[in-house]
Amino acid sequence: SDPAADARARDALEGLSVGDAFGERFFAPGAPDPGADTLPAAPWHWTDDTEMACGIVDVLARLGRIDQDELARVFAARWDAERGYGRGTRGLLTSIGAGTPWRAAAAAQFGGAGSLGNGAAMRAAPLGAYFGGEPDRARTEAALSAEVTHAHPAGVAGAVAVALAASAASADPDLGGADLLDAARAGIGDGPVRSGLERAAALLGAPAEEAARELGNGARVSAADTVPFALWAAAAHPGDFTAAVRACARAGGDMDTTAAIAGGVAASRGGIAGVPADWRAAREPLPKWIAPPPRRG
Ligand code: 8NA
Ligand code: MG
Ligand code: MG
Ligand code: MG
């Protein structure tokens, strides 16, 4: 594996998991007003978004690429009913764990349509950071990582868009808002994720509530309803991790997942230095099973 790439992926994972755990906290009864400048009480528990992203970082750390059979094995071995997985993904991972080949299981989801949920996108930022500045590689590997669970083209497109944004952000920390959205859009075909990203570019000066109203806030848990807004949040707050994830919490909807995507892309851009220490300390520790980072040098 490549130690510098691995370090970029782990920074993105920090941003992703802090965003996930922060956003999830606003579903709790008695959560603070997401418009206020306060932090929810610790600990912040991470969810499926983080657990599956850890699976991707683990496979990349050990193999340097996405081996789909190995990724499916890790997803199925590590999934935990307590972490709030999507309805379809719960059944899928149980079935893979029981011996169904992942490709058949993923193809059978939702009456044979495949999943267009946001679950492949929610875990894709660390992969994009790993392949920082290599958009073609980021696109290919992101699609491989998505197909293990999401056979519908929109589910795959969401993951590719997030990975391309993270790859571009990690290669150029000064990348401006519209350029970040362009990078995300460049590698995906026509469809609802692409058209959402086009509308997102026109909303870069708008308040988060308006962007969420126009683009969706993830309430339908689909990639198309989630990725354009989450990438808008990262693009509209360049260099400002906390503003990006707070915008996701203010928008409501699938807050853990929009904040995981925005936080992962924000940390791909600025590295871990942009994620405040008190936010990182509030998030519960990441699972111990993830492969240790390779030695540098
Ligand atoms: P998924 O594959 O179950 O898809 C998520 C949802 O999208 C499904 O439950 C369906 O409602 C819908 N969906 C997907 N494909 C189709 C289709 N072809 N036709 C009609 N509807 C479809 O799971 P996933 O891994 O994509 O989901 C990730 C999400 O689940 C994340 O938000 C994650 O945090 C978790 N989650 C979401 C919620 C929520 O309701 N906001 C709650 C708990 C957990
Ligand atoms: Mg979640
Ligand atoms: Mg488990
Ligand atoms: Mg979610």
Image (tube, rainbow, N blue to C red):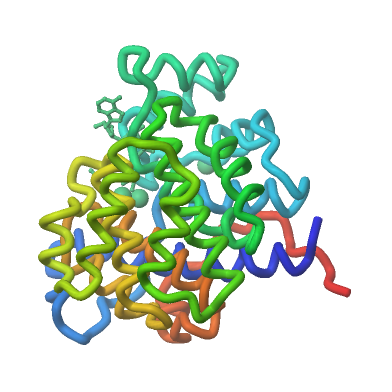
The number of discs equals: 0
Quadrant of the drawing holding the N terminus = bottom right
**Quadrant housing residue 262:** bottom left
Judged left or right of residue 108, residue 286 is right
Looking at the image, the residue that sits furthest to the right is: 297
Give the residue drawn at x 28%, y 39%: 192
Residue depicted at 79% across the width and 61% down the height: 2
Question: Residue 162's x, y, as percent?
Answer: 45, 53
Does residue 201 sit above or below 145 in this rendering?
Answer: below
> Is 112 or 289 nearer to us in this picture?
112
Q: Give the quarter of the figure containing the C terminus.
A: bottom right
Residue 126 in the figure: left or right of residue 254: right
Rendered residue at 76%/49% (across/down): 64
Residue positioned 34% across, 32% down in the render: 116
Q: Position of residue 147 (x, y in %)?
A: 52, 31
The quadrant where residue 100 appears = top right
Q: Is residue 77 left or right of residue 180?
A: right
Query: Residue 224 location, x and y as percent?
Result: 28, 42
Examine the rendered structure and indicate whether residue 116 appears above or below residue 160: above
Asked whether residue 101 is in view, the answer is yes
Q: Is residue 45 visible?
A: no
- Residue 283 place in picture, x, y as percent: 43, 71
Q: Is residue 221 left or right of residue 58?
A: left
Using the rendered view, name the quadrant where residue 271 is placed.
bottom right
